[in-house]
Amino acid sequence: VSVERVYNFGSGPAAIPVEVLEKAKGELTNWHNAAGMSVMEMSHRGAEFTKIAADAERDLRTLLAIPGNYKVLFLQGGASMHFAAVPMNLLRGMKKADYVNTGEWSKKAIAEAKKFCEVNVVASSEDKNFTYAPKQSTWKLSADAAYVHYCSNETIGGVEFQWTPETGKVPLVSDMSSHILSRPVEVSKYGCIYAGAQKNIGPAGLVVVIVREDLIGNVLPGTPTVLDYKKMAEADSMINTPPTFAVYLAGLTFQWLLERGGLAAVEKVNVRKAKLLYDYIDSQDFYSNPIAKEDRSRMNVPFRLRDEKLDAKFLEQAEARGLSQLKGHRSVGGMRASIYNALPYEGVEALVGYMQEFARANG
Ligand code: PLP
């Protein structure tokens, strides 16, 4: 690796594998040293880009073992756009949807869905300040919901579902923005999975939607054409100009994951990384993490210093060591280490080493 890089703990936009960036850099002005132009400059209808997009879809299908009856879409507007697109596409003439509320991103999805349908909040962890994932046995599912939506990894709170909910015949929908591709997923248990790209996939703006084909084709009146999952599926996500460079970068990331042995191998590394950090946090009382142990996120680790007056100093000295973007979300305060796929084990070792030293010097 030729560039000097920090360990980037940002929650999104987040670290991208340096090998991916180097490859893109090498091809920036002349793709494959053959096209005579950047991917950014190519026609999305041309043979080269058509292949780039098809290869990206193929590799994502391989990584997640996506069954043939699911469509894979590369869309735009961020995950937030799909807070609206999900009800527009999946209500299918019904009037109600079930939502689980586990934190900030759930709340945003719920607020958006309320513009389109009756929302029944089937379970919530608000009673304990969103520090756990409500057990399936407590969910009060509706009989007549079009789908059940949850956020399987709450990026801000640091709560991750370590299990897949069972919703019977009612399709399960998940916002997987901040943990997609961090572990294998049983796609067949879902009606729809969607994820903004800027954590484990690539540049912000791109959204991956994986949707069961029998659920699409009955949109709410007024749904914009580019948000119609069926029409986009029929057009290979190219009714309009796709975010071509983002799709290309995503494709390089998928290759990078395949080269590392796929998601089962990637998951092992992620488990080790998270364990190293949580074990340290639990071993002392200078830092703390409030999340129920069985529901802690492997991707986003919020933590507080015992004395918040030290926060600014902690962040300043961290930056000076190349440990970047550790500031927690403004709604939660404290620190947050996002340790996505592109953040290596050594980065977590460096963070824990720094935390130990800082605690010794300031405890
Ligand atoms: N959902 C989750 C879980 C997120 O972490 C985020 C933040 O990036 C979003 C949705 C919103 O994504 P975007 O800003 O791309 O709309």
Image (cartoon, rainbow, N blue to C red):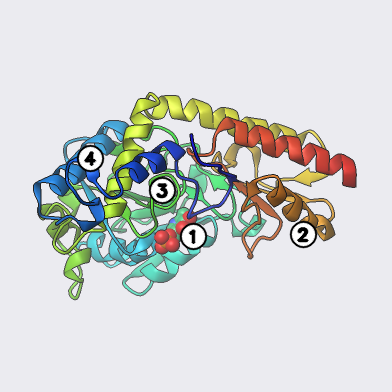
Q: Position of residue 185 (x, y in %)?
A: 37, 35
Q: Residue at x 48, y 38 (%)?
A: 341
Could you say whether the residue bearing mark 1 is in a helix, strand or loop? helix
Quadrant in which the C terminus is drawn: top right
Mark 4 vs mark 2, CA separation in Å: 46 Å
Q: Nearer the viewer, mark 4 or mark 2?
A: 4
Residue 247 visible in the picture: yes
**Element carrying mark 3:** loop
Amino acid of disc 2:
Ala
Note whether 335 is above or below 76 in the view shown.
above
Badge 2: residue crowd in 10 Å (few <14, some 14–19, many ≥20): few
Q: Quadrant of ligand 1?
A: bottom left
Give the residue number, with chain letter if any, for mark 2: 312
Cα separation between marks 4 and 3:
35 Å
Cβ(mark 4) to ligand 1 < 8 Å? no
The amino acid type of the residue labelled 3 equals Met
- The residue that mark 4 highlights is 33
- Under 8 Å from ligand 1: the CB of mark 2? no
